[in-house]
């Protein structure tokens, strides 16, 4: 017999599990269905983010950074470490432990909030009395019925035609997070977020990494000054980044992968590598959901079509996260999940896409919120810019990490902050202050007048805000 709920959430990634918890907090009876399994077939809620995305990549970035510090940087601090060696099994094993802690944490939160969790693959059965029918296939098949259904099925890595993922030699983010050996030569197609983060991990651990990027400019969505500074730093670290390339045929033998490509100048090359990571963007998970069965509107790329409130083309069906338009970021998915749950409870939430921060967790880290200088120029908006280098920041010097700068962009007339860009140490944390200022529609003068603790990296943001008015104190 069908089980009846107020809300059924399909997917327990950051969009889905957060929507489920918020709906339960608001007094609704909630079911959340998720298909992800551990190697042993146990439920592994948390989606891409927890299992093969945000969390494991950050664990590997941290461990590989420690390794690089022990090899290259501790001596500068007068700490002589001898005989540094890599235990890759332990390093990857630690990452798996961190992932499991997150899986278990979500199962605990479901229990605490009385969210009914179903492990299996969900698909729409149709419209029935009492709402929408959702069938769960798996060890315990079920039929669930709810007036409201939230689709949060996420996304998967996009493959290059003719080079399907085998996760042995041609790797998506999944295989790239669990290599059994550090490859001698690693090729990466796509110098986006995954290519740079995972390329950095394996370079730090000893691989020779070559990244092939199709776009003519490095990190074209990023502020040009930031992209330039980051490219300089990555190149110095040994990442070989080639932009404007056209990737051709990819051939596999038992031992290596050969990538034929034409460089920006038109010369033909053959890149030979032990492993290849393909990180050229992601596609929404809508196949098999039964969208056709119920007449749910998808766009030409397979994304669920939604309005600003995340309502789909069908009443009572909502969609959030990677499976809909907008940036594919965990925190964006979470904001949408909360907003839909609150809307179902009769509240009037909203998600501000203008203040969604971006972070690339490389070294230096790259983080930003709001508009880039090139966007403001294209829009013809009059603005003032102020920058401050970490080289002139006392805390950065004490840390021994002075690469990069902070840049504040403010409206020329009103001084409202329009964008803030960081490239440098711990940018991922520093960006939060800029987000808060922009969320409150603050001015650069507001940042400049806030007392910042000394010595901290956050003083670089204050100084960049002062620089908008040409009155930086320490530079
Ligand atoms: P997902 O997290 O993809 O979750 C969807 C869930 O739905 C999955 O568990 C899936 O199994 C399940 N599902 C799908 N179809 C069905 C079905 N029919 N029935 C039942 N269950 C189903 N974002 C950041 O903000 N910060 C980062 O640092 C970051 N790092 C990343 C690193 C990597 C390597 C990758 C690949 C991504 C990273 N992201 C990061 C992006 C982030 O992971 C996604 O934006 C986020 O996971 C999207 O959340 P979601 O809930 O929409 O979907
Ligand atoms: P991406 O969109 O960040 O980068 C893809 C890159 O591949 C682009 O630079 C693009 O120009 C290039 N490209 C596309 N087709 C190509 C081709 N045929 N040949 C050569 N280059 C090609 O996508 P990526 O890195 O796969 O990551 C997917 C998404 O996951 C990101 O957009 C982001 O939303 C999310 N993510 C977020 C992270 C974070 O927040 N720190 C970390 C990792 C992923």
Image: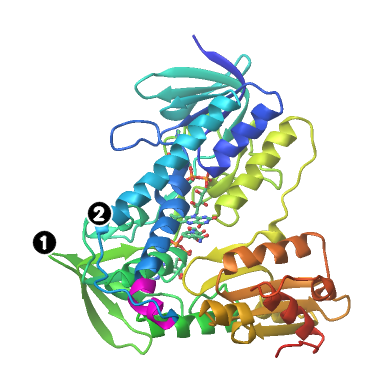
Q: Residue at x 27, y 70 (%)?
A: 84
- Residue 445 in the image: x percent, y percent? 84, 76
Horizontally, residue 67 falls left or right of residue 103, namely: left
Q: Earlier in the sequence, mark 1 or mark 2?
A: 2
Considering only vertical position in the picture, is 177 above or below 309?
below
Horizontally, residue 416 falls left or right of residue 330, namely: right
Bin the neighbour count of mark 2 within 10 Å (Cα to Cα): few under 14, some 14-19, many 20 and up: few
In this orientation, does residue 239 appear?
no
- Residue 282 in the image: x percent, y percent? 44, 55
Residue range corresponding to the magenta coloring: 68-76
CB at disc 1 and ligand 2 closer than 8 Å: no
Front in this rendered view, residue 40 or 87: 87
Considering only vertical position in the picture, is 174 above or below 129?
below
- Position of the C terminus, as image quadrant, is bottom right
Front in this rendered view, residue 7 or 379: 7
Give the main secondary structure of the magenta stretch: helix
- Residue 254: numbered disc: 1
> Does residue 69 belong to the magenta stretch?
yes
- Residue 45: numbered disc: none
Residue occupied by mark 2: 89
CA distance for labels 1 and 2: 23 Å
Q: Residue at x 24, y 67 (%)?
A: 85
- Residue 131 in the image: x percent, y percent? 62, 20
Bin the neighbour count of mark 1 within 10 Å (Cα to Cα): few under 14, some 14-19, many 20 and up: few
- SS of the residue at dot 2? helix
In this orientation, does residue 183 appear?
yes
> Does residue 320 belong to the magenta stretch?
no
- Residue 223 in the image: x percent, y percent? 61, 78
In this rendering, the label closer to the viewer, 1 or 2: 2
- SS of the residue at dot 1? loop
Q: Residue at x 82, y 60 (%)?
A: 440
């Amino acid at each position: 017999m069908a089980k009846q709920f107020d809300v059924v959430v399909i997917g327990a990634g950051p969009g889905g599990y957060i929507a489920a918890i918020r709906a339960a907090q608001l007094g609704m009876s909630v079911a959340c269905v998720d298909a992800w399994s551990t190697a042993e077939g146990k439920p592994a809620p948390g989606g891409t983010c927890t299992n093969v995305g945000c969390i494991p990549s950050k664990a590997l970035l941290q461990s590989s950074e420690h390794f690089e510090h022990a090899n290259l940087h501790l001596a500068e601090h007068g700490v002589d470490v001898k005989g540094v060696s890599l235990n890759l099994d332990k390093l990857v094993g630690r990452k798996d432990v961190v992932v499991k802690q997150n899986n278990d944490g979500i199962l605990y939160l479901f229990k605490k909030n009385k969210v009914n969790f179903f492990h299996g693959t969900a698909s729409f059965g149709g419209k029935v009395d009492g709402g929408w029918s959702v069938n769960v296939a798996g060890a315990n098949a079920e039929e669930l019925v709810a007036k409201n259904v939230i689709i949060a099925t996420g996304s998967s890595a996009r493959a290059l035609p003719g080079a399907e993922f085998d996760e042995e030699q041609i790797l998506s983010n999944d295989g790239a997070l669990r290599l059994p050996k550090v490859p001698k030569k690693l090729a990466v197609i796509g110098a986006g977020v995954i290519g740079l983060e995972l390329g950095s991990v394996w370079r730090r651990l000893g691989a020779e990494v070559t990244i092939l990027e199709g776009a003519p400019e490095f990190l074209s969505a990023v502020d040009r000054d930031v992209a330039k500074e980051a490219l300089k730093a990555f190149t110095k670290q040994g990442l070989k980044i080639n932009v404007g390339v056209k990737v051709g045929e990819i051939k596999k033998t038992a031992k290596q992968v050969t990538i034929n490509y034409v460089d920006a100048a038109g010369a033909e090359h053959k890149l030979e590598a032990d492993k290849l990571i393909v990180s050229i963007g992601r596609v929404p998970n809508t196949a098999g959901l039964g969208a056709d069965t119920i007449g749910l509107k998808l766009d030409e790329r397979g994304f669920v079509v939604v309005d600003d409130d995340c309502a789909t083309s069908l009443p009572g069906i909502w969609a959030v996260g990677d499976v809909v338009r907008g940036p594919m970021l965990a925190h964006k998915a979470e904001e949408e999940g909360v907003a839909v749950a609150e809307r179902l409870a009769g509240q009037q939430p909203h998600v501000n896409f203008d203040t969604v921060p971006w972070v690339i967790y490389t070294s230096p880290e790259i983080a930003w919120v709001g508009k880039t200088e090139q966007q403001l120029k294209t829009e013809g908006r009059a603005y003032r810019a102020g920058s401050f280098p970490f080289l002139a920041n006392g805390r950065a010097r004490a840390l021994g990490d002075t690469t990069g700068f902070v840049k504040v962009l403010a409206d020329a007339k009103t001084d409202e902050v329009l964008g803030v860009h960081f490239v440098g140490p711990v940018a991922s944390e520093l960006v939060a202050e800029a987000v808060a200022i922009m969320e409150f529609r603050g001015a650069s003068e507001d940042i400049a007048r806030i007392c910042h603790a000394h010595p901290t990296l956050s003083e670089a943001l204050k100084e960049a805000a002062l620089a908008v008015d040409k009155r930086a104190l320490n530079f």
